[in-house]
Amino acid sequence: MNWIQKLYETYDACKSKIGIITNDDEMPLLPICHTTQKAQIEIVIDGDGNFKRARFVPKEESRTIVPCTESSGGRAGSKPVNHPLCDKLQYIAMDFIEYGGEVTFGYLSNPKEPYENYKRDLKAWCESDYSHPKAKAVLKYIEKGNVIKDLVDHQVLFIGEDGKLLKKWNRKIVKDAPDSPQEDAFVRWIVEIPGEQQAAVWTDSGLFESWINYYLSTKGGRDFCYVTGTVIPSAEQHPAKLRNDGDKAKLISSNDTSGFTFRGRFLTAEQACGVGCEVTQKAHNALRWLIARQGRVFYEGKGREPGLTVVAWATSGKDIPDPLADPFTMLGFASIQSDSEYSVSTAQELAQKLKRKIAGYSVELGDTTDVVVMGMDSVTTGRMAIVFYRELTGSDFLKRIDNWHETCSWFHDYRYVELSKPKKGSSKKKYLRFVGAPAPSDIAEAAYGKNLDDKLRSATVERILPCIIDGRKIPKDLVDSAVRRASNRIGMEPREWNKTLSIACSLYKKLHEKEGLNMSLDKNRKTRDYLYGRLLALADDLEQWALNDVGEERQTNAARLMQRFADRPYTTWRTIELALSPYKARLGGKSLKRQRLISEVIAMFEPDDFISDKKLSGEFLLGYHCQCEALRNKEEGDKKQTDEDKITGGH
């Protein structure tokens, strides 16, 4: 029950944010006994229940906070339970059947039942000691039985020649109409009462409190709550809609009276899980809000159903870094852009920026603030399980995030931003370099390809999460898979290969973190695999230089033979070296520095190591990548010096 306790504490710590909707895409922190729906119709009435006007609600304004019961909050099946105030037309409109509306399957035997149930529940609220003027006004209006007629008269709903509701909306009048039938429209209310500044029912905190107090007063069953340790009204059902508005999976469900959810262990569902109604509402509302605000949901399958979901939060409500983010996301576009030209010093600068960013979180959090990292996944549409759960202090959490980005760091250039005004003829994408650990989702792509199965992506992220949070060793099979794919250069597009290469280097460095491998070129490192990687980079660079000189566009021999080189380095090197002869001749004296570098690297080998055809490890990729970066930085430095000489006249 720890997770419920922590979410319950988080809800109470963030009370100031309850019920605030800033935009339609954002899930608000809901009051208890409330849920959200996407409304299509908005009806305006006065305090006496008289119709004034109505309109179709644009999609960007449609998110609506509505009162609900435990049953209606997770309603499903052929006979869904009504909400108490805002709901679909079949519930609120007495004349729904008269205009040809079709109720859901379970109500076919008595089509008036949805309206009668809705009216009964609303009336009970209005006649209680916790009634509210807006709820009373809605009751007076729906009792007149003219809801559909009023909407048709004001061209919000549309009927055919037979006087029955059309299945589809009139898109000539309602341009943003959804594809769903008119009769499925959800209705929300605005009640204009003189002196009341807050007319919309979905933003009225007084109405929220009125419903909460009334509904909790109707909860008769009291039981021991394992979270608070007190006897309070118990929960009959637990909320759904945790990952999105259509999510039916629940973390707690004990309503299987005919199966084996609790039978054989307990006599009743309440004995299986004793949680108070208010407690479970607060905990689930907090979790729903946190997932929407800072969680990561990995969608699966053709229908893109929500799968693995990871969320980290501080119980105090303070901001914390995303454990699944890379530095590009954590630092933001501005910091990366200013350091877009990579150098060794830049790598250190970015690493320091990331450390300062994490240190900034530490100042806000303090050392003792509780931080929770929680992973959830669902096997069926109705059941969800917690697959990862850790409680840490704020200082421990930040240390582990910092350690992950330090020990798994490399430089990458696969992140980009879309330019609003690109130069004529140039790409709309600007690729920016960053230093740090790759995101787990990108690691999955590097290991298994960008078209990997959704379930495999989720499973890979789930395997990497303990490496970040618990400091566990990175799985060797992931590293080996990424190294194999990075070695197969001709099997990928250049951008995908560059991304795979840099991530493979990150993972190999992480796997061998005790060796203290560097991101910059280590000219004193004499291991066989590292030196062979340097040789491949030098050969690749020399041939590419010669091809660029004559404007020829094709892959170099080093690129084409990279996979073979990884398997049989000595034999393949002889082939590559012989193929370099015409390019050396084409470049003439310009290639002497490269040739001298190649000779120097070969001289660093132990004789037996050089002539060995033993398969190379992932270390050769580090040597290759570091040598490429050293050559590139030298070329950029030479070009910069040349440009400065032109400006200053060589002085």
Image (cartoon, grey):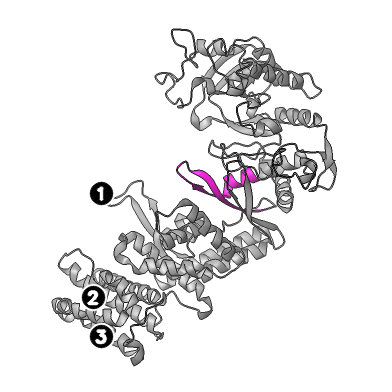
Of the image marks 2 and 1, the number of the one nearer the N terminus? 1
* Amino acid at circle 1: Lys
Residue type of the residue flagged with mark 2: Leu
Q: Position of residue 352 (x, y in %)?
A: 52, 68
Q: CA distance from mark 2 to mark 3?
A: 12 Å
Q: Nearer the viewer, residue 339 or 251?
A: 251
Of the numbered discs 2 and 3, the one sitting upstream in the chain is 2
Task: Say which residue appears at 28% left-offset and 50% top-offset.
Answer: 423
* Relative side of 100 to 126, left or right: left
> SS for tag 1?
loop
Q: Nearer the viewer, residue 79 or 141?
A: 79
Marks 1 and 3, Cα distance to the nearest angstrom?
41 Å
Q: Which residue is mark 2?
A: 542
Q: Residues within 10 Å of mark 1 (few under 14, many from 20)?
A: few
Residue 596 numbered tag: 3
Percent of width and height locating residue 636: 31, 70
Q: Write down the region rendered in magenta.
A: 287-314
- Asked if residue 171 shows in the view, the reply is yes
Q: Position of residue 607 (x, y in %)?
A: 33, 92
| Mark 2 surroundings: few (<14), some (14-19) or many (≥20) residues within 10 A | many
> For mark 1, what is the residue?
424
In reply to whether residue 382 is colored magenta, the answer given is no
For the residues labelled 2 and 1, the Cα–Cα distance comes to 32 Å
Q: Quadrant of the C terminus?
A: bottom left
Q: Is residue 310 magenta?
A: yes
Say which quarter of the image contains residue 529.
bottom left
